[in-house]
Image (spheres, rainbow, N blue to C red):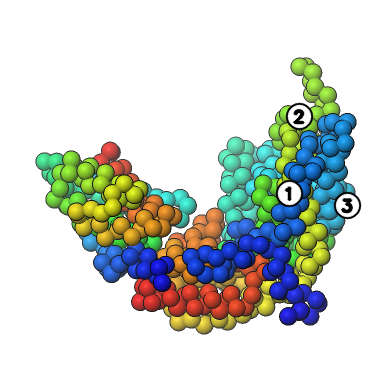
């Protein structure tokens, strides 16, 4: 049935071949899109067609195929620029994923700008990928990692953020949308404050990119990291956006081919942006897939996706939250994409196994956010996370699946 | 339905009972050996404290946090190894690993009740966690 803006869930679902797969004798209910989204046929085809018809190395040959591969590679860079409203496609750096993007910034900008006694600020709801690179940096430099705490609802305590900010703050790195709780953080406001003390800002958009339009000019972040595979694209390709002036001044991340202007044994002159940060043969097929994914998402419309997922989120909070013996974890003011819950007396892994026996794929565990689990005093949660292809019927299946959990463990 | 039968086979009543009422979970005095195992992917933990007298485990405590399988397997292990020599325990460990890897179809010991786990490959590591903790204790 077409939605209010022409969003037709049936036709959306038809574009994802994996949704026809049966798991343990049941139609798949995929509620693990926060881990990785499923891929539409156009993305699968783009990768396959690239290898079948255009495979070659980029920026190398004078031959036609190399030019085709380079065109695909650079077109996706431009599509990415437009997606996030960056000023210049040279501000778009291809990386493997969010994790590599953050590591890149920590080990280049971070090493260059963070010194002894300086502070790096993150939040209490970061994924490990936005904690550990900064810990490594702080340890190396004798700097301090400061953490903005959150309250019992899973909202950041902004007064504490204000208190932590000082002229020692060199970097503020925060998650946009919590993968464990679904909290949407007030990043625009945080970054505005960070700028007043001269700190650079990094937005971890791994979870937010598939659920909402991200405008780097509006948010005014210095860096944005996200992954293709959560945005209906392939694994192994991700994006680091950085403001041109910052990227220009940063030292390279890895040395090798592609990232140089000239090499002698005495001195190497690095290439201009973005090549400076793209050493070695890149994941060209991944960029073909990512380009198709961005086209696909644009065609559906991220606003339509967000409206649909809001319906799913509200329905799941009401339906799953109403079950006796189920406790929802976190109740943030602004949220998207995810519900986390625990079942009385049953470990999340056991919940996961029982749900899997009914074809329902959820994530059970600490979601690479152990500090979040510690905050709520639990080892793990069950997390159901949504993509554009999910339906309220699937949340009913989840509801019935949880009833089955009580039958097994009752 | 087969998947339901598989579930019942893994979550046998005796397994769930060990999960709900773990045996040997009280602390012991002056352990001679201590070990632990943590699965970093799921956060499950098992801690083992042993008292060995003349090569025999006469007291032990087995504690931990985690899923029903990891904790029931820990309790079952503790009950099984109590009063046994380290040589006998080595043989039990070998047999149990063989059961989990599909080498043995069943076991003579009470650990046999865990054989349903092997239908769920991602859960086998849960059943083996306690044995890693025991190995850690005995190697220390």
| Residue A199 appearing in the image | no
In the image, residue A90 sits, relative to residue A295, either above or below, namely above
**Left/right of residue A138 with respect to residue A66 in the rendered view:** left
What kind of element bears circle 3?
Answer: loop
The subunit letter for the residue under badge 1 reads A
First of labels 3, 2 by sequence position? 3
Residue A340 percent coordinates (x, y): 54, 69
Q: Which residue sits at x=41%, y=58%?
A: B120
What kind of element bears circle 2?
Answer: loop
For the residue pair B104 and A384, the one nearer the viewer reads as B104
Q: Residues within 10 Å of mark 2 (few under 14, many from 20)?
A: some
Q: Which residue is the site of mark 1? A: A47
In the image, residue A139 sits, relative to residue B129, either above or below, namely above
Labels 1 and 3 share a subunit: yes
Labels 2 and 1 share a subunit: yes
Q: Which residue is the site of mark 2? A: A257
Q: Which residue is the site of mark 3? A: A87
**Left/right of residue B3 with respect to residue A277 in the rendered view:** left
Q: Quadrant for residue B5, please give it.
A: bottom left
Gap in angstroms between the C-alphas marked 1 and 3? 28 Å
First of labels 1, 3 by sequence position? 1
Q: Which residue sits at x=42%, y=54%?
A: B121
Q: Quadrant for residue A268, please give it.
A: top right
First of labels 2, 1 by sequence position? 1
């Amino acid at each position: 049935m077409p939605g209010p803006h022409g969003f037709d869930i049936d036709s959306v679902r038809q574009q994802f071949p994996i949704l026809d797969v049966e798991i343990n004798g049941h139609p798949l209910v995929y509620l693990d899109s926060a881990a990785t989204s499923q891929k539409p046929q156009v993305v699968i085809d783009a990768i396959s067609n690239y290898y079948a018809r255009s495979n070659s190395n980029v920026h190398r040959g004078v031959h036609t195929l190399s030019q085709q591969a380079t065109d695909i590679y650079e077109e996706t860079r431009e599509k990415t620029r437009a997606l996030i409203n960056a000023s210049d496609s040279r501000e778009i750096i291809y990386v493997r994923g969010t994790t590599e993007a953050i590591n890149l910034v920590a080990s280049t900008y971070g090493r260059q700008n963070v010194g002894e006694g300086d502070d790096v600020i993150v939040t209490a709801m970061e994924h490990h990928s936005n904690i550990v690179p900064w810990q490594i940096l702080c340890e190396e430099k004798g700097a301090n990692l400061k953490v903005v705490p959150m309250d019992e609802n899973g909202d950041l305590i902004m007064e504490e953020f204000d208190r932590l900010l000082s002229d020692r703050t060199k970097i503020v790195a925060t998650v946009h949308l919590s993968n464990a709780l679904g909290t949407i953080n007030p990043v625009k406001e945080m970054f505005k404050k960070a700028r007043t003390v001269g700190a650079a800002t990094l937005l971890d958009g791994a979870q937010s990119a598939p659920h909402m339009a991200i405008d780097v000019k509006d948010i005014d972040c210095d860096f944005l990291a996200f992954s293709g595979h959560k945005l209906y694209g392939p694994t192994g390709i991700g994006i680091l956006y950085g403001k041109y002036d910052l990227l220009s001044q940063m030292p390279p991340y890895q040395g090798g081919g592609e990232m140089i202007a000239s090499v002698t044994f005495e001195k190497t002159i690095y290439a201009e942006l973005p090549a400076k940060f793209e050493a070695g043969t890149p994941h060209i097929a991944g960029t073909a897939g990512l380009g198709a994914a961005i086209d696909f998402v644009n065609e559906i419309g991220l606003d339509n996706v967000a409206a649909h997922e809001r319906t799913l989120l509200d329905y799941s909070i009401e339906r799953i939250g109403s079950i006796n013996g189920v406790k929802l974890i976190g109740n943030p003011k602004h949220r998207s994409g995810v519900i986390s819950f625990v079942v009385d007396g049953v470990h999340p892994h056991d919940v996961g196994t029982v749900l899997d026996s009914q074809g329902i794929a959820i994530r059970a565990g600490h979601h690479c956010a152990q500090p979040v689990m510690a905050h709520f005093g639990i080892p793990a949660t069950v997390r159901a996370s949504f993509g554009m292809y999910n339906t309220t019927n699937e949340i009913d299946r989840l509801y019935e699946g949880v009833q089955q959990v009580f039958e097994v463990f009752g | 339905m087969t998947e339901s039968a598989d579930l019942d086979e893994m979550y046998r009543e005796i397994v769930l009972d060990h999960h709900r009422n773990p045996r040997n979970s009280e602390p012991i005095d002056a352990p001679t050996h201590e070990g632990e195992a943590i699965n970093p992917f799921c956060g499950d933990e098992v801690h083992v404290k042993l008292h060995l007298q003349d090569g025999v485990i006469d007291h032990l405590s087995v504690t931990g946090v985690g899923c029903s399988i990891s904790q029931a397997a820990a309790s079952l292990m503790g009950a099984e190894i109590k009063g046994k020599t380290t040589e006998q325990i080595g043989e039990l460990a070998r047999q149990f690993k063989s059961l989990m890897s599909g080498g043995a179809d069943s076991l003579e010991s009470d650990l046999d009740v865990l054989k349903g786990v092997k239908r769920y490959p991602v859960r086998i590591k849960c059943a083996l966690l306690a044995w890693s903790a025991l190995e850690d204790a005995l190697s220390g």
